[in-house]
Amino acid sequence: MRAASFLCLLLLSFSSSFAQGGFKVVPLGVKGGNMDGNMSAYMVAPANSNDYVCFDGGSVSQGIEKAIANGVFNVKPDIVLKQYLKAYLISHPHLDHLSGMIINSIDDTAKNIYGFDKCIEVIKNHYFNWQSWPNMGSDGNAPVLRKYRYNVLTEEVHTPIDNTQMVMKAYKLSHSNPYESAAFLISNNGNHILYFGDTGSDDVEGTGKMKVVWNAVAPLVKSKKLKGVFLEVSYPNEQPDKKLYGHLTPKWFMKELNRLAELSGLENVTGLNVIVTHIKPTGNNEETIKKQLRSANSLGVNLIFPVQGVAFELK
């Protein structure tokens, strides 16, 4: 009897450990553009860890406070900022993607900032320059305070994320060609998630950059190892293509996901977690975009509309 009980406990323990695969997500900001205090930033960690990275940094402290109010963390805000949050992955240097990181840098602890060369150059020359803000970076105008260490990424190269279990690959995106953004593919223990910064569709931008990313992740979709895709929709379908400025509408969002389905198989895309980011909260945009996305979802992906401070898991 004792042996049977021990075996049951062992199996339950193994099952619980196995179930911990995947990632947990804490949205610190979810809107695009002009929603002060609720702009693009997503804390992400392996399911069994509190070593988070932050995809972009538009809003930080307000998102942490909302997460604590919602019971996501049971520690003080400065513990989340200083101890749980290990690094920022900045897709591009627009203020709605990094203003929270900049403002909170005074109270933060040492961290890495990962980004492509053009992104890092803008942060260094235009924000951490002692004119816009004290130089918290590891290079630039003296005195260099070195709180944040710049890590310039090379496209499609595996890069370990310091102080975490995670590894990433980064891909360049077109954000109103010739301006750049980035996609980050995060890996941990055989599981993966994909985050797109602001991006236009290949058909509008004429660059083919999104297809490069889809080709890279299609095998992960086939093997059910891609646990989620963060993809932006900024405007409803009524927005003219010439006024998208490097963003997606529901029409282009679904067209891009159809490209992924062509590469990986429709049956493998059905049920894929797709987190809808960067909706611009102008007028009734949010209601319209959600309706248009749901109506066009012939692929059967699992559309997730994140809420600031409300955590969720990607399994």
Image (cartoon, rainbow, N blue to C red):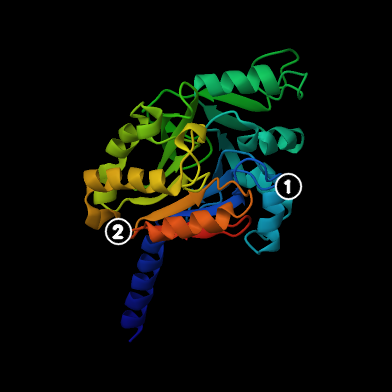
Examine the rendering and report whether any part of residue 147 can be seen.
yes
Left or right, 31 with reference to 245: right
The answer to which of 90 and 93 lies nearer the viewer is 93
Image coordinates for residue 302, horizontal then vertical, percent: 39, 60
Image coordinates for residue 33, horizontal then vertical, percent: 63, 40
Label drawn at residue 136? none
The secondary structure type at the circle numbered 1 is helix
Instruction: State which quarter of the image contains the N terminus.
Output: bottom left
Image coordinates for residue 154, horizontal then vertical, percent: 42, 23
Image coordinates for residue 46, horizontal then vertical, percent: 47, 51
- Mark 2–mark 1 Cα distance, whole angstroms, equals 40 Å
In the depicted structure, whether residue 115 falls above or below residue 237: above
Q: Residue at x 63, y 23 (%)?
A: 123
Q: Residue at x 23, y 43 (%)?
A: 263
The answer to which of 293 and 75 lies nearer the viewer is 293
Could you tell which of marks 2 and 1 lies nearer the N-terminus? 1
In the depicted structure, whether residue 105 falls above or below residue 254: above
| Residue type of the residue flagged with mark 1 | Asp
Label drawn at residue 270? 2
Q: Residue at x 66, y 23 (%)?
A: 137
Left or right, 43 with reference to 158: right
Disc 2 or disc 1, which is closer to the eye? 2
Q: Do tag 2 and tag 1 residues touch (Cβ < 8 Å)? A: no
Left or right, 270 with reference to 104: left
Crowding around mark 1 (Cα neighbors within 10 Å: few <14, some 14 to 19, many 20+) is some
Residue, disc 1: 78
Q: Residue at x 73, y 54 (%)?
A: 76
| Residue type of the residue flagged with mark 2 | Thr
In the depicted structure, whether residue 245 falls above or below residue 68: above
Examine the rendering and report whether any part of residue 304 can be seen.
no
Instruction: State which quarter of the image contains the C terminus.
Output: bottom left
The answer to which of 154 and 92 lies nearer the viewer is 92
